[in-house]
Image (spheres, rainbow, N blue to C red):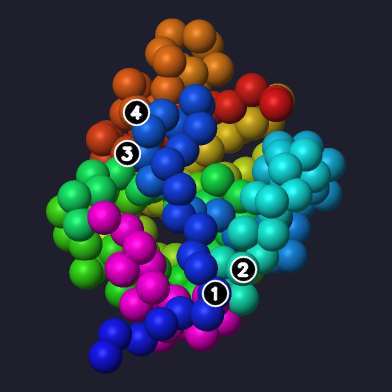
Amino acid sequence: MEEEFAVPLCIALGNSKVGRVWTFSLPSFVTCPGASTWCRQHCYAWRFERLRSNCRRAYIRNLALSLEPERFVAHVLKSLPEDASLVRIHVGGDYYSPEYSAAWLEICQARSNTQFWSYTRSWSVATLRLGLEQLRALPNLALFASLDSEMPQPPEGWRLAFIENDPRASGVPCLHQQGQVESCLECGYCFRERAGNVVFTIH
Ligand code: SF4
């Protein structure tokens, strides 16, 4: 008999910015061990969660399930349609433990025909780096190191997601923020290209 999950997973079709792609989120702050003070002060995900308490509750349920990695992997694979072509991991939240990033490694490997993409500040936490390097090596996951001017020099070889006021910023200005595309789906720069940085304006 198929196992019944007591906790429903929230994996949803995205908003107007990302376009109709599948998204998965966790509650912000508590799952963001690499967040700088600047990031916490400007967190758009936190503002969104405060406005939408039902979303925050859903993200908390996602977090609860993710604490049991085996069940989490099974549940994501069950919830995500087989023909899902694009998944944005963490509109809110981040990779908070080695076990959690290992769960996403398993999910991405099981869905080799799905393209995943994600931004993380957890690269700045030494104990999480190895798991993130394994994720970054996957052919179907575009993983960026997010940073702002308070953060140290990012690891070599990563694609970087800058904030525009960082003196180190270089790369393509986000085309959605420039008003050049309707959504990430239309743009595709972050997940169709294999190289190149992106620069975001302050939300
Ligand atoms: S550069 Fe393109 S794909 Fe990347 S976040 Fe902006 S709109 Fe989305």
Q: Which of marks 1 and 4 is in front?
A: 1
The residue indicated by pointer 2 is: 61
* Quadrant of the rendering where the N terminus is positioned: bottom left
Amino acid type indicated by mark 1: Val
Q: Is mark 2 on a helix, strand or loop?
A: helix
Image: magenta residue range? 65-81
Using the numbered discs, state the Cα–Cα distance from disc 3 to disc 1 in whole angstroms: 30 Å
Q: Position of residue 5 (x, y in %)?
A: 46, 79
In the image, residue 54 lies at what x, y percent? 69, 51
> Which numbered disc, 1 or 4, marks the residue that appears first in the sequence?
1
Q: Distance between the residues labelled 1 and 4?
A: 30 Å
Q: Distance between the residues labelled 1 and 2?
A: 7 Å
Count up the numbered dots.
4
Pick whichever of labels 2 and 4 is earlier in the sequence.
2
Quarter of the image holding residue 125? bottom right
Q: Which residue bears the numbered disc 1?
A: 7
Name the residue beneath numbered marker 3. Answer: 191
